[in-house]
Structure formats: C-alpha cells, structure tokens
C-alpha cells in the first residue's frame, strides 16, 4: 500500500454528498459576493455624476424618484447583505471541508497504525520511535493543513477569480484582457519561490525528527545514562540537535517570509499597473469613473484569492513531501499473513512441537540457528541449555512465530504453522520473556492487559507466581502503579508478574526463557512447586543456566553456536560432565 494524492482524492470522493453540497455552497457564495464591489461605484456615476443608469432606474421604477441618500441607503443595504450572506456561506463551507479533511487524516493515521501493528519484528527493531512519532505528528498534520484549508479555499478562490474575470470582461473587455493576461505571470513567478521554500521546510522537518529520535532514546535509557553518569553528554547532544532545529527553523522562517513578501510585492506592482491602465482607459473615454472605481475594488477582491492559490502551492509541496515520508511506513515489511486453515490448539489441552531443518539469521548474513531438528512430545517438559549468545532466545522466538522461518518447517501437532496463522499460535503459546517489560500502568492492567477478569482469578495467579504476599502488602493492591517499564518492581518481581500473566492466559504451550533467573534458589523452588499442577499438563520448554531450574525436565537440548550439539535425559547429559558443566552454572 502507498498513499498518493490519487488515493486521497478517492477518499475524498467517499464523501460525495458533503463534497457536492460544499461545492454548491461555494458556487452560491461566489455568485452572491461577486456583484458587491460593483454596486457602490455605480452610484458614483448615477448619483454623483448624474448619469441615469441601471440602479437608479430600477429604484425609480419601484419607488418613484428619490433623494440621493435613499439611493445610497438602499445600495448600502444591498451591499452589506450580500457580504453577510457570503460570510455565512463560507463558514458553512469551511465547516464541511474541515470535517471531511479530519476524517481523511484520521483514516491515514489509522492505516499507519494498522500497518505498524502487523510489522515484522525485524523491521520494528530497525526503526526509532522518535521518527515514527514525528511522522504521525508532524507529517500527518502537514497533510491535514493542506486538505483542510487548501482544498476548500482552492474552490472558492478559483471561482472568485472566475467570477471577477467575467464581471471585468463585461465592464471593459480590453482592460479585462490586459489584467487577466498579466496576472498569470505574477502567479508563475511566485510559484518558483514556493518550490524553494518547501526545500527549507523539508530540512526543518528532518532536524525535528533527529531531535525527537534522540530525545526519546535519552528518555527511554535515562536510568542507564544516569548510572553511567553521562547525563551531561546526552543533554549536550540534545542541545546540538535543538540548535539544528533552531537554525533550520530560522532559515525556513525568514526565507519563506522573504519569498511570500516578494510575491506580495509582485502583486502590488501588478496592482498599481492595473490601476494606471484603468485611469488610462477612463482618460481615453472608454470607461466611466464609477466603473473605474469598481475595477479598483475588483482588483482588491482578486488579490485575496490569488494569494490563497499561492499559499495552496506552498502547502501542496509540503504535503507532497509529507506523503513521501509517511509512505516510508507503508514500505516497511509486514510479517507474513498465514491463513487460518487448521487449529490444532482448539479442543486440546496441549500440543507437540516439531522443528525440521530450521535455519535462521537476523541479517541474512550471520546464521544464528543452523539446521535445528527438534521434536517435543505433547505434555513433555524439556530444557534448552547453552552459553550466552548460543541462540536460545532466538530459538524460543522462532517457536512462537516472532520471526518467519527462512528455511525449514515448524509444526504444532504436525500441522504446519503456515496453515494455522501467527495470531492463533501466539494466543496458545506463551513465551515468558527473559527481561519482561511492563506497561506504565497498574498491576491489574499489566496482568489482564485490559481484559475483564475476576479479582479472585488474579489473586490466585499471583499466589502461584509467589507475588501474593508482596502485592497484598501494597497500599493500593492490584491498583498499584508499576512505573515506566515496571521500574517500581524488582527484576525478580517483574519476572514473576510475567509468569502470573502467563497463568491467567492459560496457554497450551509454555516457554520460559530464563524467566526465573533473577530469583533466589529458594523462591524459584517454591515457584516451581506451585506451578507444578499447571506445568504438568502442558508442553513446557525451559531455557536456563541453572541446574536447579531444569530439574524436572524430561529431556534436554544443548545448544552451541546455533546448533544442537547434545541431547538426552538429564542423567545422560550429566554423564558428559565437562561439556554439561560448561553450559550450566552449577
Ligand atoms: N534482534 C536481533 N537482531 C540481530 N541479532 C540478534 C538479535 N537478537 C539476538 N541476536 C544475535 O543472535 C545471537 C543469539 O542471541 P540469543 O539472544 O538467541 O542468545 P541466547 O542464547 O538467548 O543468549 P543469552 O543466554 O545471553 O540470553 C547473538 O549473537 C546475538 O548477537
Ligand atoms: Mg536469551
């Protein structure tokens, strides 16, 4: 998918009824407002210079001959009414358009979010959250400005220019042609400036993005930074980025200002030339003084819309760049979409897993897993051991379908993952992460993730996870806030929170990736005793460094450099002594 102006136009056409209504309103508004500047100047001819004419003749027909002030009052009233109607209609028109444009940008944001939510993990790891948020905030807003103000104004502006052109042609076609032919030059020259300005805008956006990237990283890693006493360096880095924003901003602000003023100057120059031409036409007897004044008025009326059209060009260039940037999101690869053909998890308490010839690499260069062949029987507890960096976590993530397989096959109850669907797999296999991160919310939310759950169930899960005593000692209990990433809980408490979440989800298959590494041996022991009932009935994969953690494993795989180098029961492996001890901390 990609967002283009064509696609946006198609979105716009979904609001056909509103769009047509708004355009009809625009046409009426222009028709109503166009004669307004003509009326008063006609009185100059008809009342001051005493030539009989259109207005006085009609008023005389209706009311009989009148004093001068009656003509003036009537015409004043007509002019003011026309202007008031125009005012009301444009407000209505702007309202409809801003509603349409907000709906469209809402849809763009929604599509971006949807795409992000299905992004493959490897793409996700390569982008910064600062960049993404600047796309959502700055760039979508740029498009919104363009849509909201520009499109609605474009129609009124073009119609106004057209209306004025027609009136000018009716008043004096030679003078009108002169004005209408010279005017486009003003527009074209100004357009050249518009392109330049949008380049500076791009630079300003880039610096903004770099700043927001650095800022969010600094905030995310604040603890780390403080621990290594590096605040000053990081703040300095942010100062530099702020300064870049400032400089790019100044550059953009003053240069765009110069360009805008220059185009205004051009316009004013044109304005004076047209006035001179009008006086010239009067001098040669082809135009009355009243009509000349009317032309002065129309020049003024034209000025607004033409400036508006120029602004739309600036806005258009900005929006085009914003669209390109937003499309960076849509270019990012999503994870594969597997169809929901079979569901081996449904109706069964637990399932087997088979990995067949699985190879994996994060970067398509360094292979992390090499030809992994593992079969884990239904309901068995197995363990994976191996040195740090040997690929255990990677293997666990492959088993949950976090990363698509590059080579080999993955089966649950002998059904290929490609026939099950990643969402179904993740619903039924729970991977307790090595370093679980928590939401900056309550304990309750972190356990239920917003699902409606009975407090009794939650406490039951906390009891098994060996957290009941601690959490019931908190003043707010389940409603205690855990802080950013769960910092208000200890590492071991966070691990147990994740285990409690697993208990509540009640998955068919459980993978514990060093999920008890932060616990003391005693707490770990109590935890496994309490978990016994739950683990007994399920396929469980435990990844660990400690012998105590894998005590109840039926079978053990030993991983080295992404390869299974040994496998067997605990007794069999212990007999290997040296090799086993290398991978186990005891
Ligand atoms: N997201 C990633 N992107 C790129 N490379 C990665 C990524 N995650 C891990 N790796 C690399 O893959 C290799 C295996 O990492 P993995 O996390 O699977 O090891 P591990 O056995 O779980 O180690 P530990 O015992 O320290 O948790 C490492 O060399 C690591 O550099
Ligand atoms: Mg690991």
Image (spheres, rainbow, N blue to C red):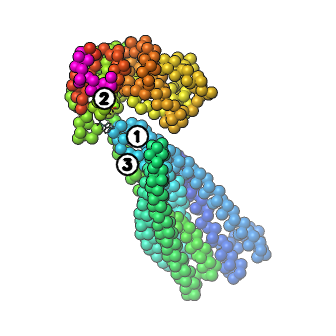
Q: Position of residue 341 (x, y in %)?
A: 33, 23
Q: Residue at x 47, y 69 (%)?
A: 255
Disc 3 residue crowd, few under 14, some 14–19, many 20+, Cα 10 Å: few
Q: Quadrant of ligand 1?
A: top left
Q: Earlier in the sequence, mark 1 or mark 3?
A: 1
Disc 1 within 8 angstroms of ligand 1 (CB)? no
Tell me the quadrant of the picture where the N terminus can be found: top left
Q: Earlier in the sequence, mark 2 or mark 1?
A: 1
Q: Which residue is mark 3?
A: 328
Q: Which residue is mark 1?
A: 115
Q: Position of residue 544 (x, y in %)?
A: 34, 25
Q: Residue at x 26, y 22 (%)?
A: 580
In the rendered image, the residue lying farthest to the right is: 67
Disc 3 from disc 2: Cα separation: 33 Å
> What secondary structure is found at the residue carrying circle 3?
helix
Disc 2 within 8 angstroms of ligand 1 (CB)? yes
Q: Residue at x 66, y 63 (%)?
A: 83
Q: Compared to 122, does 450 lie above or below?
A: above
Question: Hey, which quadrant is residue 167 in on the image?
Answer: bottom right
Disc 2 residue crowd, few under 14, some 14–19, many 20+, Cα 10 Å: many
Which label was assigned to residue 392? 2
Q: Nearer the viewer, mark 3 or mark 2?
A: 2
Q: Earlier in the sequence, mark 3 or mark 2?
A: 3
Tell me, yes or no, whether the highlighted magenta stretch contains residue 133.
no
Q: Compared to 432, does 204 lie above or below?
A: below
Magenta range is: 572-586
Tell me the quadrant of the picture where the C terminus can be found: top left
> What secondary structure is found at the residue carrying circle 1?
helix
């Amino acid at each position: 998918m990609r967002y283009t102006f064509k696609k946006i136009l198609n979105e716009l056409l979904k609001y056909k009824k509103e769009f047509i209504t708004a355009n009809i309103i625009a046409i009426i508004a222009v028709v109503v407002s166009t004669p307004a500047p003509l009326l008063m100047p006609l009185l100059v001819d008809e009342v001051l210079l005493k030539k009989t004419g259109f207005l006085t003749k009609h008023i005389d027909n209706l009311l009989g001959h009148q004093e001068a002030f009656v003509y003036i009052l009537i015409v004043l009233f007509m002019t003011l009414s026309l202007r008031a109607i125009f005012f009301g209609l444009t407000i209505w028109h702007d309202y409809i358009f801003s509603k349409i444009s907000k709906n469209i940008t809402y849809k763009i944001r929604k599509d971006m979010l949807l795409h992000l939510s299905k992004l493959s993990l490897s793409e996700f790891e390569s982008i910064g959250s600062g960049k993404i948020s600047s796309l959502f905030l700055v760039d979508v807003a740029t498009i919104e400005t363009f849509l909201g103000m520009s499109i609605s104004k474009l129609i009124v502006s073009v119609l106004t220019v057209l209306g004025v052109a027609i009136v000018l042609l009716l008043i004096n076609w030679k003078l009108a042609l002169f004005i209408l032919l010279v005017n486009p030059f003003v527009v074209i020259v100004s357009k050249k400036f518009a392109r330049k300005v949008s380049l500076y805008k791009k630079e300003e956006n880039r610096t903004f993005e770099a700043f927001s990237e650095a800022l969010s990283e600094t905030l995310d890693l604040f603890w780390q930074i403080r621990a290594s006493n590096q605040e000053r360096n990081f703040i300095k880095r942010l100062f530099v980025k702020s300064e870049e924003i400032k400089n790019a901003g100044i550059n953009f602000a003053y240069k765009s200002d110069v360009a805008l003023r220059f185009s205004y100057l051009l316009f004013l120059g044109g304005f004076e030339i047209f006035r001179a031409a009008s006086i010239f036409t009067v001098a040669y007897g082809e135009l009355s003084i009243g009509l000349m004044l009317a032309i002065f008025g129309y020049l003024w009326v034209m000025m607004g819309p033409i400036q508006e059209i120029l602004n739309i060009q600036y806005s258009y260039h900005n929006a085009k760049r914003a669209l390109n940037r937003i499309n960076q999101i849509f270019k990012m690869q999503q994870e594969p979409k597997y169809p929901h053909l079979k569901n081996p998890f449904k109706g069964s308490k637990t399932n087997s897993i088979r990995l067949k010839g699985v190879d994996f690499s994060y970067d398509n260069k360094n292979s992390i897993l090499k030809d992994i062949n593992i079969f884990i029987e239904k309901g068995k507890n197995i363990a994976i051991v191996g040195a740090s960096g040997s690929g255990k976590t990677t293997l666990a993530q492959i088993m949950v379908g976090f990363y698509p397989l590059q080579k080999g096959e993955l089966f649950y109850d002998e059904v290929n993952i490609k026939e099950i669907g990643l969402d179904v797999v993740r619903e039924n296999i729970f991977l307790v992460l090595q370093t679980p991160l928590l939401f900056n919310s309550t304990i309750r939310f972190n356990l239920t993730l917003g699902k409606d759950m009975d407090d009794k169930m939650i406490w039951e899960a906390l009891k098994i996870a060996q957290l009941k005593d601690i959490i019931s000692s908190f003043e707010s209990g389940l409603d205690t806030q855990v802080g950013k990433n769960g910092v208000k809980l200890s590492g071991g408490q966070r691990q147990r929170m994740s285990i409690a979440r697993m208990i509540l989800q009640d998955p068919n298959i459980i993978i514990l990736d060093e999920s008890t590494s932060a616990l003391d041996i005693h707490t770990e022991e109590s935890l496994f005793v309490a978990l016994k009932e739950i683990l007994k009935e399920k396929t469980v994969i435990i990844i660990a460094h400690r012998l105590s953690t894998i005590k109840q494993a039926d079978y053990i795989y030993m991983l080295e450099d992404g390869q299974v180098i040994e496998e067997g029961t605990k007794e069999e492996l212990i007999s290997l002594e040296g090799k086993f001890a290398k991978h186990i901390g005891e």
